[in-house]
Amino acid sequence: MICNSIDRTIAIGDKRLDYKTIIFKVVEFLDNTIDGFPQFLSSSGFIEESEKRINEMLATYLNNCTTDFFDIESFRFSFIKDTTNKSSNYNPDIGVMLGNKMVSTSDSFFHIECKRLPARAGHEREYVHGKLGGIQRFKEGNHGKGLNYSAMVGYIQSGTIEDWHKKVNSWIDDLFLTNDKLSWEKNDRLLIRNNESRSKFISSHSRQDHQNTIILYHYWLIV
């Protein structure tokens, strides 16, 4: 399985790429395409506010973009809505798989969890923690188990990116003072990844059960 073989290589046609190279190709792809999703959503006439429906549209949009971004015969990704997570009862919102016809594996090697900002009443902090907490699920290993890299997408439906960045990090800061078994720390805070595009962040998280640290790439979109 890809998720348990981060240091190995995989054959794609006549090439062999290591898993870190593949993961960084996913990040490059998301960096170059995901900012166009709000326009895609708007031009489609989409007015449904259900998070699940927005996720479906995001997966459709990303899959459409792969035909323009990659040479299909040598490299392609497939974005699967509600992909099955074999090692957990929790399924990430979107799983990324290798979609090239020359690759036989069907395992997702990169998970994407999506959250609305603000969340519904009573679950205001679920981007970070709680029963449906996004970052928490990665720290617990319910999402991204065995993976070194994954991502979160924030659908901003009111407020500014700057305000939400401060608020999300303040929620993480509040957890420093708890005796939570997940051991929240400064590295859990979201850092701006690119000053030219202040809607993309990165964070690093220790996990339970002595798993390796997981790096999360965060993409926030005003939808």
Image: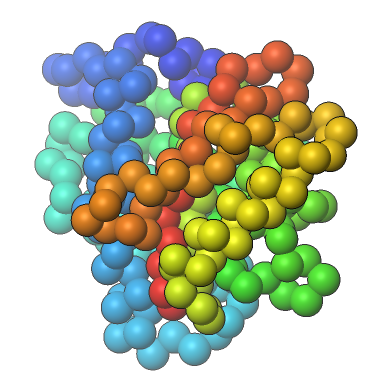
In the rendered view, does 181 fall on the left or right side of 41? right
Indicate whether 134 appears above or below 145: below
In the rendered view, does 81 fall on the left or right side of 60? right
Q: Nearer the viewer, residue 86 or 184?
A: 184
In the rendered view, does 118 fall on the left or right side of 182? left
Q: Residue at x 67, y 70 (%)?
A: 119
Q: Residue at x 33, y 69 (%)?
A: 37
Look at the image and tell me in which quarter the C terminus lies: bottom left
Q: How is the image coloured?
A: rainbow
What is the total number of numbered labels drawn onto the structure image? 0
Indicate whether 101 appears above or below 94: above
Residue 135: name its quadrant.
top right
In the image, residue 78 lies at what x, y percent? 37, 46
- Is residue 68 something that shows in the picture? yes
In the image, residue 208 lies at what x, y percent? 74, 23
Of all residues, the one furthest to the right in this rendering is: 179
Q: Residue at x 54, y 28 (%)?
A: 214
In the image, residue 74 lies at what x, y percent? 16, 32
- Is residue 96 something that shows in the picture? no
Indicate whether 31 appears above or below 216: below
In the image, residue 100 lies at what x, y percent? 28, 36
Q: Nearer the viewer, residue 183 or 1?
A: 183
Q: Residue at x 27, y 68 (%)?
A: 36
